[in-house]
Image (tube, coloured by chain):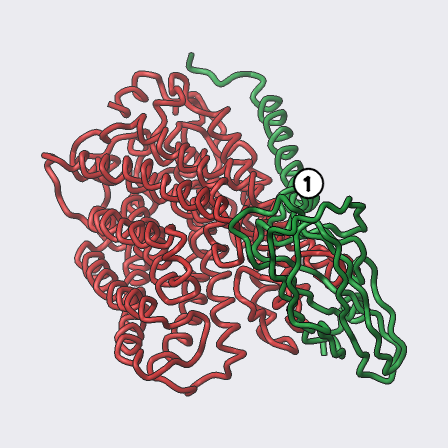
Chain colours: A green, B red
Amino acid sequence: MNKRPQNLNSENRSLTGRLVLMAVAMFGFGFLLVPLYDVFCAITGFGGRTNATAAVVEEAPDLSREIRIEFVTTVNSYAPFEFAADVDSMTVNPGKMYFATFTAKNLTEADRVAQAVPSVAPVSAAEHFTKIECFCFTSQEFFANEQRAMPLQFIVDPDLPEYVDTITLQYTFFDTARAAANNPL
Amino acid sequence: MSGMTTRHGPAKGIGRWLFSTNHKDIGTMYLVFSLVMFFVGGAMAMVIRSELAIPGLQFVHPEFYNSMTTMHALIMIFGGVMPAFVGLANWMIPLMIGAPDMALPRMNNWSFWILPVAFGILLSTLLMPGGAPAGGWTMYPPLVLQTGDAFPYLIFSIHLMGISSIMGAINVIVTIINMRAPDMTLLKMPMFVWTWLITAYLLIAVMPVLAGAVTMLLTDQFFGTSFFLAAGGGDPVMFQHIFWFFGHPEVYIMILPAFGVVSEIIPTFSRKKLFGHDSMVYAAASIAFLSFIVWAHHMFTVGMPLSGQLFFMFATMLIAVPTGVKVFNWVATMWRGAMTFETPMLFSLAFVFLFTIGGFSGLMLAAAPADIQYHDTYFVVAHFHYVLVPGSIFAIMAAVYYWLPKWTGHMYNETLGKTHFWASTIFVNLTFFPMHFLGLAGMPRRIPDYSTQFTDFNTVASIGAIGFGLSQLIFVLVIVTAWKGSKATDRVWEGSHGLEWTVPSPAPYHTFETPPKARIANEAFE
């Protein structure tokens, strides 16, 4: 009873090995949180995420209900662009397809690539706001000083919760070249 | 301790410290390192409070001010509090469980010597173009990506601190699991050992996640990834989730060993056994578990669905239950005890009282609707300083006073100790209590200037801070004069229990080379 186990060293080594493995696994878990977060946001619409690729939806208009859609546009501080929705808001029926256009202008003398990142508020509306076609699905290339209108085609799901009467769709416009080069102004 | 014929003392000269594998030497180095960092981080706090003493910009550039808040936090957390607890663990855990040393002595040497390198790198950023990191210790992107040349050094130093902590934690677990004295079952372990075992598991679980998060920052900045860059499909809010998945357990990493220390000291000076030892263990384990599912209460304002806010709010408030168990158990331990008020007991009592104040402001912050008002104000600063300064740091000081006679073999100067205690306690409240009012009135954190209506409370806080800073010089005086006091007995304190008090004072370089006899061990627990 008064002796330490003879195999203490090997016991220490095996426990150490397991603990190191646990630390390595947790390092991996940190990275695993990235896809988990994406999946979680995609399923629940947390963070106001909407579908990132084109969706196919049947039209089933519900003319008894009117929803106000508000467009908010922001230009990231490092992006030399003008960017705005052509109308500030529109009133829509759920289940019916609508078009909106946004106009952006490259303010520099060089060709640039931009990316719009959407967010929908309230978050409970995010999964019910479906984009059929959107300029935000791909990055947008602009020649020097080019100005151009960009299309958005969307449909509001009739399952939209009763209490939602206004949906805000917000876009932030980023200069991807600058993001890639990581060269803040 | 008989039966060993070959014994050797410490090596001579600097080599003793550079190559030491002795848990007592390494513990001492950790504690001295932490004291140095406490003063470095404290000097930065002095810069902050001097700047805030009156409205307007007087001493430092705002950018430098932001560096000071960022560096103060990083240094105090990773350089002050955490190494101090690892130092205490190194010194005391083998003595408390009757082990001859830590299980992995050479790794122990590594985990200490990485730290001065890590903090050398971190402090060197003060001299770099673009200045030291200034985006807050939480390193939120995209702001942190605007750090100048210091950025990769910040990330690398965090990596090193993480590696050091993980190695320290592995060592603690292996020591506790494999090297306890015969007959010492897990539930017979002293509370300090228990809380450290749980803390060590927390460290292994979350420090790698922090390492992952900062690695993602690094690759976003230099290797073209877009983990947190919205333009490339990433999400900066995700960083906050990953960071606080680390960050919330981290706050319990800094408080659980403090709970352990206080659970050792209060029974000694109440001359009673710790009330509800097993419930204390379960409470600490519950706190550790809950710490993993409450992280988003740090980010109620980022925009979260109602269900999420409710979950994180209630889960957070649930932590008050096991914490309450602990506080009531300490009070019950003192109940009808023959109490005396030596310096370690004074610090422990102040810990119980002032930590509870910090706990209550934590409950206020946990209420999601109220938090939207309190978020990023001085109320938050008041809250976390109450749990960290009169919480963790008072517990560390209590531990140093409690075990110093065992380390040095001499009693410290009790009058100086009590002076240090009263000065610290008065000034710590003078510093941080007014911050509650400032925060509720709307003063934001991390701003070098403020509206004039906040002047009075800020001036009071600055006077308190300077007073608190100067009071710590008394602490240094106590430590450097500790070798002049009267000879300490083995038991040191009349009411002390546990194996560490069965070895001579000062503790010999090698102890428990043969495990303590079960009878001695059992008596030590009674």
| Position of B93 relative to B381 (above/below) | above
Residue at the limit of the structure toward the front, as seen here: A64
Question: Left of B231 or right of it: where is B345?
Answer: left
Residue B145 pos. (x, y %): 66, 67
Q: Chain of mark 1?
A: A
Q: Which residue is mark 1?
A: A28
Q: Amino acid at mark 1?
A: Gly
Total numbered labels: 1
- Whether residue A126 is visible to the viewer of this picture, yes or no, is yes
| Position of A94 relative to B492 (above/below) | below
Q: Splitting the image into 4 quarters, where does residue A85 fall? A: bottom right
Mark 1 Cα within 10 Å, few/some/many (few <14, many 20+)?
some
Quarter containing the C terminus of chain B: top left
Residue B391 pos. (x, y %): 32, 52
> Camera-side residue: B507 or B360?
B360
> Camera-side residue: A128 or B385?
A128
